[in-house]
Image (tube, rainbow, N blue to C red):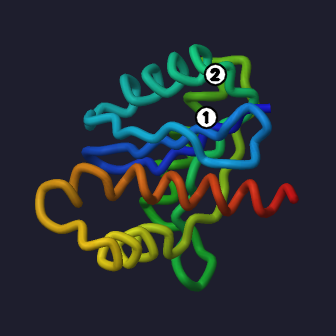
Amino acid sequence: MRIMAVDYGDARTGIAVSDISATLVGETWVIHDKNQASVAKAIAEAAAGRDATLIVVGHPKNMDGSAGPRAARSEQLAEALRAMCNIEVVLWDERMTTVSAHRVLDETGRHGKKRKEIIDAVAASMILESYIAYLS
């Protein structure tokens, strides 16, 4: 089983894919696109090309558990992916993953342009790690 995690953003979408045993984060990258339909298409193609059996879309709920506009956009992306590919798609609570990703990058000394380029991939990795831990 290979799992793909998605940290959907306005301009950049982070992607992380597990190893075949779904125990470790493997490949990560960022899709630079603002159009939801083309982001969904790129995710669906990447999932098919990597034999993913599950797509986990980060669901950015508010701290009180309510769903705001960002959560609604993630829900729309998840629906588009379900319609586009024959792979199970789940929403996963991603509260605080971007904050945690920034903390990790602070600890590793990543700043400036390089940080902006990888923050979404790091957040996707954290979503994936959280989901893998849930499965264990």
Local crowd size for mark 2, using a 10 Å CA cut-off: few (<14), some (14–19), many (≥20)? few
Judge left or right: residue 73 versus residue 91.
left
Q: Nearer the viewer, residue 65 or 124?
A: 124
Task: Say which residue label 1 marks.
Answer: 79
Where does the image place residue 101, in percent across and percent down from the top left? 41, 68
In the rendered structure, the answer to whether residue 107 lies left or right of residue 11 reads right
Image height of 120 relative to 3, above or below? below
Going by the image, does 18 lie left or right of 46? right
The residue carrying pointer 1 sits among few (fewer than 14), some (14 to 19) or many (20 or more) residues within 10 Å by Cα, namely some
Disc sitting over residue 21 in the figure? none
**Which residue lies at the image location 54% right of the left edge and 72% below the top edge?**
95
Horizontal side of 58 relative to 102 (left or right) equals right
- Residue extending farthest bottom: 64
| Residue ID for mark 2 | 83
Instruction: From this view, report whether residue 89 is shown above or below residue 44.
Output: below
Which of 10/19 is in front? 19
Q: Mark 2 and mark 1 in contact? Answer it, CB < 8 Å.
A: yes
Q: Residue 14 placed where, x, y %?
A: 41, 45
What's the residue at 75%, 28% (across, down)?
A: 53
* Residue positioned 74% across, 31% down in the render: 20
